[in-house]
Amino acid sequence: MQNVVERVLNLLIYLLESPVPVTSSDVRNTVHGYADQSDEAFHRMFERDKQVLRRLGVPLKLEAMDAWEIDEGYTVDPEEYAIPDPQLNDEERLALSVAGRLVRLGGTEAGVGAIIKLGGMERGDGIEPLGADLGEGAETLGELFGAITDRRRVEFTYRDHVRPVEPYGMAHRRGHWYLVGNTPDGERVYRVDRIEKLQVGEETDAFDKPKDFDIRSVVDSQPWEAGSEPEVETTVRFDSEVAWWAARSLGLAEPDGKLTASVSVANRDAFVGWVLSFGDSAEVVEPAELREAVATRVRESLEQLGER
Amino acid sequence: MTSSRTVSRLSRILALIPYVLDREVVDVNEIMDRFGYTEEQLTKDLNTIFVCGLPGYGPGDLMEAYIDEDDVIIDAAEFFSKAPRLTPSEALGLLAAGMTVLGSGEGSPALESAVEKLSKVVMPDADTSLTVDVLDETQNVGVLRDAAADGRVVRVVYRSVGKEETTKRDVEPWSVFTTLGRWYLLGHCRLVDGQRTFRVDRIKELGVLDETFEPPERVPEPGVGYAPSKDDITAVIDLKPAARWVLEYYPVDVVRESSRTTRIRFHSPDAEVPARLLLRLGADARLVEGPEVAERLSTIGSSLLARYE
């Protein structure tokens, strides 16, 4: 490891200081640690070291060396390399580092490496561990986050279909991460753990995000609100044993006994399913159309039973 | 293969150099404290810095780095006057961590301004592009945590997850934890006389009793999951493609799968949960086996139809 650390430091200094892109043979002939290697060994080392640089957050780029684009060379722009300084004071840094240790992202402590780059952390003692885990693979999340902040298009496989997406934002809800973005079919929500074969586009600022986009209004809607059908106002009556639970789901104050609530519905199918999840302890009062829809669903279930 | 240790070590070196350059000399203890170094690790890293530099690698090309009495000194390293930028994973991790703690109501004003400053540089529109829930049950969580710390028994009115019923129970609270976006209470439930995990959002009423208890010597690792018991009833259900979402929301076993039908085995402490599920699925599901569930389904179904007809 000692050799690798020294070699990567020397490589990075060379790249930061070189005014023009450098080829891999420049690296081999110039940077300490690469000489006296066979072609194959050099190639392996160099690939690995580039990987280390990228994981450190170094913006390593491959650029054409001349107008004819015959040769390509590596470059690191010092301005792009430098961390944008958020100007944290020590108290803020401490608060962030504590948060970073409490919250895990895909099993790893979320912010410890990051806080060191921001000027280190003061180690506070006597902090109670909350142990929150935001689940899921940090790598995919990181790539998506980068795509969102750079406005890069992404493409991935989701339920066996390839989806091109302009990523707008990310949300963590009830244990899962969601990606919200624009697709040829309009705005869509994807569960991040189902995203496969993620590809991130090269181009930055590749699309415009609507100014009034707000991730919370997308992910915080109830299933029966998330639909494109004409909205209908419904009234639902909940028996007292389930009323408090229904009130919590609807964001209403908890009732003492029964609850009669108004619910706006834009997805009738989801609404019927939700009402029936209360068994015979909830009843749609109006409109007649949705009373009928619930009754129909119940009859269908009973018919399935008859066919056994 | 890239070793994570190599990356962490380099990351710390690349953060250490600009920190010292910026201040010219820094006390050794401050560096060790701030960057989490032992003295041995710090000496090793300074010695590494000392042998690296510009091509040529002669005396004038290498960086200077050493400890002089109690000060760390680094020089001739202008190219490292700033730390490398955060990787997207690091930026997201830190931002999401900050937002999570703020959302829990446990954040301080310092954290609030830190998150604001950080998002300015890593994601200027974070307030409309990134949102993290987790912890919105602060009141009960606080009460439970105090009760666990004081060894006091709590009395809860609880709506079970697997069994759609509300019960009153006395629980000896051991620990409160959060995972998968929810708060959980782990403890000994006196109603069932065994270890149980409760979802805090399903606690309808919570009271702390005067009675105390002896916590176990070692509190088990918190964990969430449905462990079937021998008293469970089992139902076999065929799902049409439109009902496949069930696989993601209920702990079921897939018996077999084809493009048209997925056959699942559903374990549950009572017939109510599968019966209600079948009700909401309508023509998209069919009960294949499970007499208790069939009976329950036809009871609720008839009772519902009586309300609607």
Image: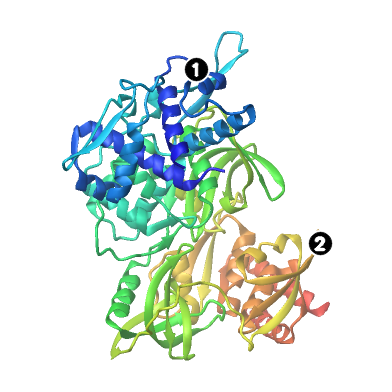
At x 50%, y 49%, the residue is: A138
Chain letter for mark 1: A
Q: Nearer the viewer, residue B249 or B33?
A: B33
Q: Nearer the viewer, residue B101 or B305?
A: B101
Q: As shown in the figure, which amino acid type bears the numbered disc 1?
A: Pro
Q: Nearer the viewer, residue A153 or A59?
A: A59
The Cα–Cα distance between marks 1 and 2, rounded to whole angstroms, is 55 Å
Report crowding for label 1: few under 14, some 14 to 19, many 20 or more residues within 10 A (C-alpha). many
Q: Does residue A18 appear anywhere in the picture?
A: yes
In this rendering, is residue A240 above or below A133? Answer: below
Residue wearing tag 1:
A21
In this rendering, is residue B173 above or below B286? Answer: below
In this rendering, is residue B149 above or below A205? Answer: below
Q: As shown in the figure, which amino acid type bears the numbered disc 2?
A: Ser
State the SS at label 2: loop
Residue wearing tag 2:
B258
Horizontally, residue B225 falls left or right of residue B17, namely right
- Foreground: disc 1 or disc 2: 1
Chain letter for mark 2: B
Farthest residue, direction front: A36
Point out the image quarter for the N terminus of chain B.
Answer: top right
- The image position of residue A111, as x and y in percent, is 38, 49
